[in-house]
Image: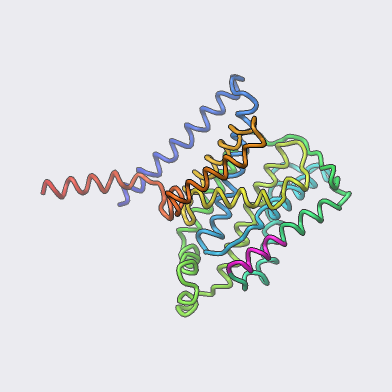
């Protein structure tokens, strides 16, 4: 078992390094088109957003559709630190993530006592409130937008994405993550067994908001300008679709869903009037033939190789 886990970790690490090296080499040799580079950065951003939302919706079993609100808070806070206070990028990203986490904690205290559709409506309202506040805040440009210097590179976006996924993955496989999964499976039973369900729901909500704010900070410091319209309900819906497409409860599924949806959206950018229609049709087909998503609650791994080897060995015996 230990050897299989170690082998999987080594293969994963080598794969991550290979992807980074190929893209970074293409950038240094100036053979990567700007549109492709933009798409790759967006893939990193949406992987952070989808995996963090999956922690709330898929792992803990809540129904939040206000992730764009936390992304907006992180984006504007990071932009303020960089532009208004001339702070370093790392401090700006951390500040945006922490303020988003604080917002997630404060919103989570009253709203996470709600369930199902009521929680969804509350988080939707929160996201729209955040957008309207920034829309009317002249300090950050209001409706015209807030200009931010481009300081994020592929290296920043990629490794922040990797770190975020590793932290979320370690949380899921910790005792706290197991408590969150038990809440998803049966909240009443988890409560009877002594698990503080409110505490763990707020914990998952806060961590998810933290990484949504981090993704927002990366977004703000890469795309030159941020506008409140960018963080509308449709952004939260896009992130939710990525999670559902990959499979609620699957971390690797969320990564796959983010990659597929971002690439499809980029490929259809030349047909803006048909992009949403085609995407919706693909999702309908997906829900008919694979309602649990591409991976369901399973994680993509190399363990099946080990199981196959064990099966062959036992048959020889």
Say left or right for 292 vs 106.
left
Q: Quadrant of residue 88?
A: top right
Q: Where is residue 25 in the image (x, y as percent from the top left)?
A: 55, 24
- Can residue 188 be seen by looking at this rendering? yes
Q: Position of residue 208 (x, y in %)?
A: 60, 57
The answer to whether residue 161 is above or below residue 250 is above
Asked if residue 117 lies in the magenta stretch, the reply is yes
| Count of numbered badges drawn on the protein | 0
Prevailing secondary structure of the magenta residues = helix
Asked if residue 213 lies in the magenta stretch, the reply is no
The residue closer to the viewer here, 286 or 120, is: 286
Say left or right for 206 vs 103.
left
The answer to whether residue 107 is above or below residue 289 is below
The residue closer to the viewer here, 136 or 47, is: 136
Colour scheme of the rendered structure? rainbow
Furthest toward the left, the residue is 317
Magenta-colored span: 116-125
The residue closer to the viewer here, 220 or 111, is: 111
Q: Quadrant of residue 197?
A: bottom right
Furthest toward the bottom, the residue is 192
Q: Position of residue 288 (x, y in %)?
A: 45, 50
Say left or right for 70 vs 261.
right
Furthest toward the right, the residue is 138
Q: Which residue is drawn at 85% across and 47% down?
A: 142
Q: Residue at x 28, y 46 (%)?
A: 306
- Can residue 155 be seen by looking at this rendering? no
The residue closer to the viewer here, 261 or 91, is: 261
Q: Position of residue 316 (x, y in %)?
A: 11, 46
């Amino acid at each position: 078992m230990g050897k299989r886990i170690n082998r999987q970790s080594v293969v994963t690490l080598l794969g991550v390094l290979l992807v980074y090296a190929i893209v970074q080499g293409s950038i240094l040799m100036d053979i990567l088109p700007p549109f492709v580079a933009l798409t790759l950065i967006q893939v990193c951003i949406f992987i952070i957003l989808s995996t963090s939302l999956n922690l709330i919706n898929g792992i803990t079993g809540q129904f939040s559709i206000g992730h764009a609100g936390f992304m907006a808070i992180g984006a504007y806070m990071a932009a303020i630190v960089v532009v208004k206070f001339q702070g370093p990028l790392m401090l700006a990203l951390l500040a945006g993530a922490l303020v988003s986490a604080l917002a997630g904690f404060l919103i989570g205290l009253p709203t996470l006592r709600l369930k199902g559709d009521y929680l969804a409506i509350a988080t939707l309202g929160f996201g729209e409130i955040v957008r309207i506040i920034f829309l009317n805040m002249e300090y950050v440009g209001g409706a015209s937008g807030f200009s931010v210097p481009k300081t994020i590179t592929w290296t920043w976006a990629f490794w922040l994405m990797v770190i975020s996924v590793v932290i979320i993955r370690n949380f899921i496989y910790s005792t706290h993550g197991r408590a969150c999964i038990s809440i998803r499976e049966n909240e009443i039973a988890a409560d009877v067994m002594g698990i503080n369900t409110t505490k763990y729901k707020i914990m998952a909500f806060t961590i998810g908001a933290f990484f949504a704010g981090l993704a927002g900070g990366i977004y703000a410091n890469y795309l030159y300008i941020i506008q409140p319209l960018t963080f509308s309900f449709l952004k939260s819906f896009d992130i939710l679709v990525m999670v559902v497409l990959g499979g609620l409860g699957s971390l690797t599924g969320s990564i796959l869903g983010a990659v597929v949806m971002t690439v499809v959206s980029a490929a259809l950018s030349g047909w803006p009037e048909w992009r949403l229609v085609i995407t919706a049709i693909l999702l309908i087909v997906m829900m008919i033939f694979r309602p649990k998503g591409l991976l369901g609650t399973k994680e993509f791994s190399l363990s099946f190789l080990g199981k196959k080897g064990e099966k062959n060995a036992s048959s020889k015996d």
